Amino acid sequence: MRDPYLVLGLSTDADDDAVERAYLEAIKRCPPERDAARFSAIRTAYEQLRTRRDRAAFDLFDTTPPAAIDILDKIAPVGAPARPERSLLQTLLRGES
Amino acid sequence: MTKKHKRRKGRVGGSHEIATPILTERAQEALDAQRWRDAITAYKELSKREDRADWRLRLADAYAGRAGELTEKGMLKEALAIWENRAALDPQLPLAPGHAALLVRLDRLDAAVALLAEDGDGALPREQREQIRAQLAARILGGDDAMLERLPDDDPIRRHAAPALTALAGYCDGDDEAVRAALAEIPFRSPYRDWAQILKALLLQPTAPAEAKALLDRIDDDSGFAPLRRAAILSLLPEHEFLGAAATAKPAEHRVAAVLRGWPSERIAVWQALHALGDDPPPKALICLLHQHQRVLGADWVRRKSLSLIASDRSPESIHWLRECGGKAPNHFEQALLTAWRTDTNRDPWLLLERWRDCAAFLEPQWHQRKDPDLALRIALLLRHADAQGNMLGPPAQPSGHPEEFDTIAAEYLEASLSWDPDDQATYLRLIHFYRRGRQLKNARRLLEQAQERWPRDMGVLEAAMDIALDARSFKKAAGLARRILDIDPINSGVRRRLVNAHLAHARKQQTKGRGDLARKELAEAASWARDTTISKRIALMTALLSIVDGDPDGVRALRDQFQGQDIALADRLELALAADAIGLWLGTVDNQLKLKKPKARDRDDLAATMTRLRSARDDDLNLSDATLKMLEAALTSRTPWDQLSRVELEAACETLARHELDRARQQAANAGRKRWRNEPIFELHRFEAKYPDGFDYRSMKDLWGLEAALDRARANGEMRTAIRIEEALPAFGPRGGLGGGPIPVPSLPPIFADDSAEDDDEGLPPDIVDIIRTIGIKRALEIFGAPPELIRSVKEIERMMGPDAATDMLLDLLGDGSTPNPFEDLPFPP
């Protein structure tokens, strides 16, 4: 299971309003008809963090080890698609690895 | 000293001595099986014997195969040597695409360029020429543009290079218009065609990934642009697939793909570090990795996730990992938390309560220093967690009433948690319902008052208040509360039903107190709230029945007209009986007043309807009076058409009858099932349980054996639920665990075990007993005789080691010769 803070793009000091806002934004970006699995993950994350009590309980009782993707998202979240530098593209065009 | 290498002897053997026809055959076999080295050896030998064009061609194929093999292994120079051997076979032999590609790859661009330059007369096949050009085109875009000067002016690589390079620059600069304009100048039959396709796909990637993928799929795997194509396809994968696929991709490919997906460079670096740890990285390695990136990840996050990783490992050394990875050792609270986490899966409620209480105890002194509300909330959550984890106070748990039982302690912790976090409505309601189940209404009310102060109009609290009022038989209060709930939520059918039931219960109370007038008023209230026509009819019937109580002759006559017909359905008689029960009117009075005959099920449909009504009565928790049950028992055992019910109906009927303890009727129904569906284990079970409702009394061992055979059949048929039920039924009939709880007398057994002197023949045990033991098995016999568990365990062990027959023989011998202390001598067998 993913870290709900990272699924919703929240910091650990987020309050109820911030959680609500992040959830609404997330489901707007990813409605169930577009990606049901992602939507379900967003919903689960929201339920884990909805209230102050939920967040404290998550902090005390969740023992899920961090997933690779959690660590990656925490260090450097995926941004907008970018374009490789010319030198990197040329490395590939030369068939080098 | 030089090392002497043994030459590998191929499967074609020493080809010098082999006759030409056989060698030809073996050479072809090796070629077909892609044993390139064997094929090369054989065809070389054959070509030495005779210069034949077909052998030369096959030798060329074998060289090509071997060169490809070496290329795949990364032995590029060796592969090129093989290609050169192939080319030397025949100057007329066309240059293989793989050879040309390798020349480009090994930076022998001059050779490739020369090849094209010398091919002015078009000797090279078109396809091959295009492939070489595409390889060179990719290299030119890759930065080797100096070679352009060496190509003829009219060569398409040279002619189309300018727009291709412009497109590259435009793409990297983010100038999509320039890219599109440049691509428009590249014709379809250009060496840069694949490049144009890839760029179009990359432009489409963010908005139309499916279309981008379709464009990329058009490019061949041996294209000079294949690495870039692979990277672009990788970038289109969903995140979870990408992580796996990137692990097998070449570094430059996944770097390009990662950038295309929007991965910053730090993410790529960490991904590479994670990838290096393998698919299932050990927790300690992950903890170390987290600590290496602590600055970016945040110290708190790293700490918390490291604790989760430690908890995921059960080894005692894991507690030291934090320190070994550069962090601080877990503090007292963290150690308590780790211990508690590891207890979470434990079923011992005491352990759960103790561990989580320990965690709370570590935080309490901190709260006294800081008065931090978050800390108070955490203490409350820790105090509640053992109950939540072990479901100690949830349904159907009831208060034991014992101060040292775990449920009492759990309830205490939960109540204590409310002093730390008084706003948790769920905890109030959990405690209220827990106390209600144990009829500790004083405790329930105490918590209810606290909850009502906080949430006076909350539905959950109002419903709890109504439930407590009903428990206390304060029907008026319950009705008032139900009305308040319906004011807030008019479509709350559950509360409406409870309100109707409250009025009905109140009506009964008034009727039994001799206040028929008030009972009528309550029934009228109930009718006004009822929305279900069945319930409305039932209330009307109850109201009509009050005329019997009131001695109203007109009302009684009307009822008599309704029920006195010749062929009144049993289902209607049941409805009448339920109505009488509901208002506390004795059924005998009703029967006398209405001059009703003994009821019976008139046909199949009536029987099915009666069973349905009986089932819903159970579901509604209606208590049937003894008179009603007696009436039903008589009606359902008098020529009842059980055999006309379907299998499903009959099985459901048996279950319903079991729930109402109508055992005689159940036995009849089960017998009907046994007759129609022979060997059905479920009917065997119902018959047995109905025949021996107070425990097996050894009336007939055949019944017991019949049930054991049914158990075997249920297991064989895969009816595991039935098998489990039979298993549960069987031991319950032992003398120590009988349904009545006390020992069951065994009248037919001789007092063999009670009196040592009774048996002194050769066999030691009476033949009948030996027969019984052999028939039902030693384990079952011991259970029936109530042997001590340790003896049964020992016998099972012997059975496992030696087989059942040998174990039986052994035990009979031991019992027979009197050398073993008699395991049954303390049992209360009759004299």
Image (tube, rainbow, N blue to C red):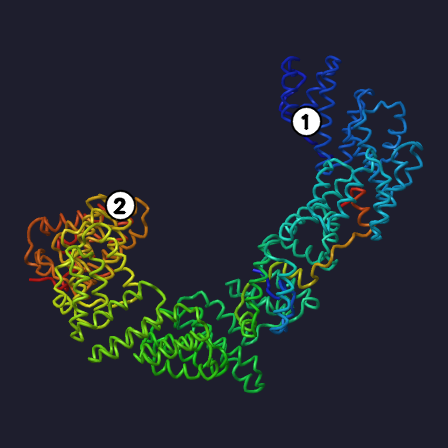
Residue B655 at what x, y percent from top left? Answer: 26, 56
Q: Mark 1 lies on which chain?
A: B
Residue B186 drawn above or below residue B563:
above
Give the camera-side residue of B44 and B617. Answer: B617
Residue B170 at what x, y percent from top left? Answer: 85, 49
Single out the residue that lies furthest toward the front.
B554
Question: Callout 2: 10 Å neighbours few (<14), some, many (20+)?
Answer: some
Q: What residue type is labelled 2?
A: Arg
- In the picture, the quarter occupied by the N terminus of chain B is top right
Side of B802 relative to B29 (left or right): left
Give the camera-side residue of B805 and A46. Answer: A46
Residue B548 at what x, y percent from top left? Answer: 17, 72
- The residue singled out by tag 2 in the image is B713
Write the residue at 80% across / 46% down.
A91
In the structure shown, which secondary structural element does the residue marked by tag 2 occupy? helix
Q: What residue type is labelled 1?
A: Trp
Question: Callout 1: 10 Å neighbours few (<14), some, many (20+)?
Answer: many
In the structure shown, which secondary structural element does the residue marked by tag 1 occupy? helix
- In the picture, the quarter occupied by the C terminus of chain B is bottom left
Residue B693 drawn above or below residue B510:
above
Write the residue at 84% across / 47% down.
B179
Quarter of image, res B531? bottom left
Side of B11 relative to B763 (left or right): right
Q: Which chain carries label 2?
A: B
Quarter of image, res A43? bottom right
**Label whose residue precedes the other's in the sequence (2 or 1):** 1
Give the camera-side residue of B803 and B775. Answer: B775
- The residue singled out by tag 1 in the image is B36
Co-location on one chain, circles 2 and 1: yes
